[in-house]
Image (tube, grey):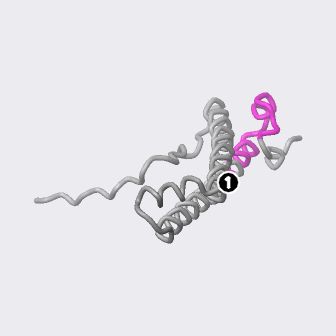
Amino acid sequence: MLHPRDLNGMTMSIEQLWSLPETALVGAYAEARRRYVEKKFERDTQRARLEWMRAKLFVNTSGGVTERRMAVDVSEELARKGQEVREMTRDLDMLKIDVDVIDTMIRLRGAHGALPIHADEPAESPAEPEVE
């Protein structure tokens, strides 16, 4: 029998997912979602570090704004870090697909999946109190 931990990197086919018992499918969903959240946090942290490095280089470079921007744009280290963040984003997108596939399986089988992941949507603001 397949275990949800066998779902590393979506190694299970759609047919295998469909044949999993409901509890194992929900476990696979939880595991995929956990990996997604971990990778998203890691990617967002790297993205923030990259922006900090760009800002620090801009401030520490002499010259006008154009020269400073040019120094940031031609920095090999920043280019490499930017490529790493883009690769992390691609991997994150693949994990999101895994989560969505498993969620769809759960919904097709009649079980209730968890709330969908809205990674790029801002959090809702609290409702304003009613004025009498």
- Picture residue at 65% right of the left edge, 56% below the top: 76
Q: How many marks?
A: 1
Taking the image as drawn, is residue 37 in sight?
Answer: no
Q: Quadrant of the N terminus?
A: top right
Considering depth in this image, is 78 or 39 the residue closer to the camera?
A: 78
User: Is-magenta flag for residue 25?
Assistant: yes
- The residue furthest front is 63
The quadrant in which the C terminus is found is bottom left
Q: Observer-nearest residue: 71 or 44?
A: 71
**In x, y percent, where is residue 5?**
81, 49
Looking at the rendering, which quadrant does residue 107 occupy?
top right
Q: Would residue 98 appear left or right of 45 to someone viewing this image?
A: right
Within the image, what quadrant is residue 125 found in?
Answer: bottom left
Residue sitting at x 79%, y 28%: 15
Q: Amino acid at mark 1?
A: Arg
| Quadrant of the image occupied by residue 100 | top right
- Relative horizontal placement of residue 2, taking residue 28 as reference (left or right): right
Which SS does the magenta portion mostly show? Answer: helix
Residue 53 x, y percent position in the rendering: 56, 65
Q: Is residue 1 magenta?
A: no
Residue shown at 81% from the left, 36% from the top:
12
Give the residues drawn in magenta, as a range: 10-30
Residue 89 rendering spot, x and y as whole percentages: 63, 47
| Residue depicted at x 22% and y 60% | 129
Mark yes or no: residue 56 visible.
yes
Q: Label 1: which residue?
A: 80
- Where 88 falls versus 10 (above or below)? below
When the figure is inspected, residue 11 is found, relative to residue 52, above or below; the finding is: above
